[in-house]
Every structure is written in C-alpha cells, then in structure tokens.
Image (cartoon, rainbow, N blue to C red):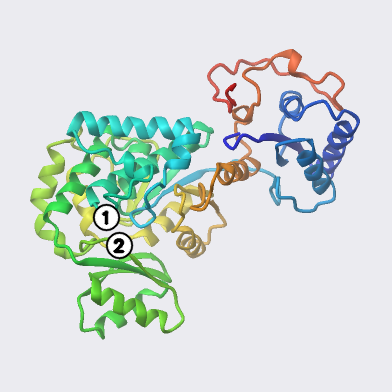
C-alpha cells in the first residue's frame, strides 16, 4: 500500500458470511502464526472473488491483523479496519479540484517523497515550465521553500502542480473520475486531468496568467470565507462603508468576499462577533470582481500566445466549472475562459449541484481539504446521498490518511481493481498458502498492465 502497510481483504455475499470468513482467517492465523500477512493477503485476493460485503485491514504485523479480525467478527471498530455499512455498488467518481486558499509551503513534501505517481507528475510540470518559460521552479515552494510564499507567480503554479499530482495518485490506484468539479484556479488542473486541455497548455497558462496578475492587478486586497448565507452577506456589505464584493458562493451557508484588506478584516470581526465562522484567505488582488474586467484583452492575449490548442478539446469526462456554474462546453476558447475564471463570481454551489447527478462518490484533491462542508451542503440541496472523502490531511506525516481514503473507496466500489493492492510483484502459484481455508481456484489472467503497490527492496 502507499503507506507501506499490507492490505488484507475479507469479503462475502452477506454480512453473516463476512463474519464467518473473518473467523476462518483468524483461526488460520492463530494456528499458523508464521504464515506471513503478505502471503495471507495475497492468498485471499488470488483464491477469492471479492464479494459485495467487504472489509480491508491495513496490517503491519500479525498482531494488527488478529486484532482487526477480532473486531470484524464482533462487529466492533478497529483503527486498522475499513468496512462499508452495506454492500459495494458500482460507483461513479467525481473529482473535486479546489482553488487558491488551501496552499502552503511544503504541501507537497510528503507526497513527493513517498509517491512516484505524484513525483513524476510534478517533475513533468516543472520540466515544462523550465523548458517553455525558463521560470523559477514552483516545485521549491511545494517542498518547503518559504522565500517567495506570497508570490502569486510561484504559489499558483505550485498549487496546480500539487493538485494534478494528487490526482495522479488516485489514477495510479485505479480510481478514475466520471465527472469533475472545478473551483476557481482548480479548473486549470481539472481541465488537464479531464482532457479538456493538455497538461502542457494548462500549466503554462497557469504560470503566465499568474505572472500577469502579479504585474498588473492592483494589490492591497484580500478575501474572507464566511459561514453565512448569501442574503445576510449582501446585507452586511450594503451596510458597510468599505469596498467589499460578494465573490464566491460555495454553498447555501458558505460564501466569500473580496475587498480592500482593512474592510475585509473588519467584516471578519463583525461575523465572528455573531458566533459564526469567518477567516481570511490571502488573495492580494480583487479576484472574482469587475475590477479585473479592464484586463480582459491583454490577459487573454497573453494566455492565447502560449497555448498550442486554442479551444477546449473533446472529452468523455464532464467538467463542471464554478466559473459558469455548469458544464464547460467543449470547443470553447481557452484564453477567454481563463479570463472569465479570474473575473466571474465563483458559483461552486451551482457547479456541484449540477455534477451531483453524474457521480455518487466525490473525492477532494487536497491535502488540506477546505471544500468538504460546501460539497456536503450542495449534495443535500441536490438530494444526493453521494459519499465524500478527501485525499489526505495537512498534519499527515505519512501516507496512511491517503491509504485509508483509498480503501474507503475500495470497500464501496464494486468495480474496484483489487489487483492494484497486490503485495507481490506478480501472481505465482508458490505465493498461495496451500492449506488456507476455503481455498478456491487460482486465477491466472495476466496482470502485466495492472499497476501494483510494490515496496522496493532496500
């Protein structure tokens, strides 16, 4: 697994049979303590079809495995046990691409060090920026360099690289989106992952647009996320003498305001004074307001000049953009859209509700998830029972959070490709425990093109 632990998959056709299967594995391990959890895990995957009622145990040793099997038999929780409340079903996944606000120096260090999929994607983006623009590497920001932490020309490309890197981790694990939802800058990464734009065009457009903003947009602004509804936000703005604009509607009770920083800070204190959530997001230019409207032609021209493809390509993955609150039409001019993405009010609420009919399991591509509450509220509006997980969490020191989220997907998705969890480099007859209980026929189909989690020899 990504975190180095061994996944042990137990499944059955009914909850009762799942309990009996867990008990059988527990009895075998008790009688054969030297069998090795790797061989037990591989034998289970090779000799059993993974059934709808399923559980996965992430074990680092036999003690972990025995304790989790005990919990599964007794229907109790265990920190190493992941199971679904009901049978797995065929799932349609929605990738959620967040915008600016979740970034921080060093946000990619963990993933760059431990995930080849993430590292390769980030390196590909860095090489493109170096070859095409001879730009300073935003990769340094990803890995912890704080010297240019407030430089838009660094942090926005870094956030793009981070997001496509996290998406690459899910894709490498066999989890592919049926639909995507983009929030503000996250739509650039979404366009690349969903095939609306090439990775090259998307990362270069991100960089040249960020550089244009840094050079031309007025500064002294900021944004605030507020836990209030649109009507109350507009009322507060109407009664405030400062320069404030409602710029983001994430969900019915989560909005954001752009404005002069002193005015925004005053509004934050007003909202906090009523006991509601309010916090600043440092965006130093007047994002998602008409103040940037005069830059339409020069900004679009700047982006257009570096694109290989002028329009969005055809894709079989619908991309719902908060820029327009709906699906992006294929064939739309890219440069003009990336200007609208900067100017338009963000309607993440509408985009998520529109996408709710296309997916029943959403994944936020963030190590510091900030959109989860908004997604949940929007799914409620859409009367959707879709599930939601993040990719990791900011305080994570290893890949265990990602592993757990991946396995949460696995126990819910009937079509999950369990071969990606193989603990060996190939399927060989010798790996099977011959005296394992209820052993079924060994599958022999080729897995040459199927990715596996392999722990390299040291």
The one nearer the camera, 203 or 383, is: 203
Can residue 303 be seen here? The reply is yes
Q: What numbered label is drawn on residue 282?
A: 2
Give left or right: position of 425 versus 14. left
Q: Secondary structure at mark 2?
A: loop
- CA gap, disc 2 and disc 1: 9 Å
Q: What numbered label is drawn on residue 150?
A: 1
Tag in front: 2 or 1: 1
Q: What numbered label is drawn on residue 132?
A: none
Badge 2: few (under 14), some or many (20 or more) residues near its Cα, within 10 Å? some
The one nearer the camera, 164 or 13, is: 164
Q: Secondary structure at mark 1?
A: loop
Instruction: Identify the residue at image location x=46%, y=81%.
Output: 275
Residue 310 place in picture, x, y as percent: 18, 36
The one nearer the camera, 450 or 136, is: 136
Residue 262 place in picture, x, y as percent: 24, 75
Instruction: Identify the residue at image location x=57%, y=35%.
Output: 2
Instruction: Identify the residue at image location x=37%, y=37%.
Output: 193
Give left or right: position of 249 versus 291. right
């Amino acid at each position: 697994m990504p975190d180095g632990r061994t996944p042990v998959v137990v499944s059955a056709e009914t909850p009762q049979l799942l309990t009996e299967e867990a008990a059988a594995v527990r009895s075998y391990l008790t009688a054969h303590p030297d069998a090795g959890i790797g061989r037990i895990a591989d034998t289970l995957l090779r000799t059993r079809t993974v059934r709808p009622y399923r559980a996965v145990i992430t074990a680092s040793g036999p003690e972990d495995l025995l304790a989790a099997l005990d919990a599964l038999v007794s229907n109790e929780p265990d920190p190493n046990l992941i199971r679904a409340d009901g049978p797995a079903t065929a799932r349609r996944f929605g990738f959620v691409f967040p915008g600016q606000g979740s970034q921080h120096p060093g946000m990619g260090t963990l993933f760059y060090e431990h995930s080849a999929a993430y590292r390769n994607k980030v390196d590909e983006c860095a090489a493109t920026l170096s070859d095409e623009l001879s730009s300073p590497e935003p990769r340094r920001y990803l890995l912890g360099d704080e010297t240019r932490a407030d430089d838009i020309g660094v942090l926005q490309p870094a956030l793009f690289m981070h997001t496509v890197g996290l998406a690459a981790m899910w894709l490498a694990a066999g989890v592919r989106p049926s639909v995507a939802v983009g929030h503000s800058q996250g739509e650039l990464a979404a366009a690349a992952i969903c095939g609306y734009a090439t990775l090259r065009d998307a990362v270069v457009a991100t960089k040249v647009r960020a550089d244009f903003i840094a050079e031309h947009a007025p500064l002294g602004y900021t944004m605030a996320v507020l836990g209030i509804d649109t009507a109350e936000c507009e009322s507060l703005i109407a009664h405030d003498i400062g320069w404030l604009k409602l710029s983001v509607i994430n969900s019915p009770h989560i909005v954001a305001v752009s404005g002069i920083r002193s005015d925004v800070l005053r509004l934050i204190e007003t909202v906090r004074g009523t006991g509601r959530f309010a916090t600043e997001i440092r965006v130093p230019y007047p994002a998602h307001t008409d103040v940037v409207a005069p830059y339409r032609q020069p900004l679009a021209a700047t982006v257009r000049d570096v694109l290989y493809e002028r329009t969005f390509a055809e894709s079989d993955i619908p991309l719902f953009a908060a820029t327009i609150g709906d699906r992006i039409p294929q064939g739309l001019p890219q440069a003009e859209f990336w200007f609208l993405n900067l100017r338009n009010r963000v309607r993440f609420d509408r985009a998520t509700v529109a996408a709710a009919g296309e997916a029943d399991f959403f994944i936020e591509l963030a190590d510091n998830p900030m959109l989860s509450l908004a997604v949940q509220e929007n799914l409620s509006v859409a009367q959707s029972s879709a599930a939601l997980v993040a990719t990791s969490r900011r305080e994570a020191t290893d890949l265990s959070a990602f592993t757990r989220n991946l396995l949460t997907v696995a126990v819910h998705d009937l079509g999950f490709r369990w071969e990606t969890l193989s603990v060996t480099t190939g399927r060989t007859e010798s790996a099977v425990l011959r005296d394992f209980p209820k052993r079924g026929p060994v599958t022999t189909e080729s897995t040459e093109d199927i990715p596996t989690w392999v722990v390299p020899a040291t």
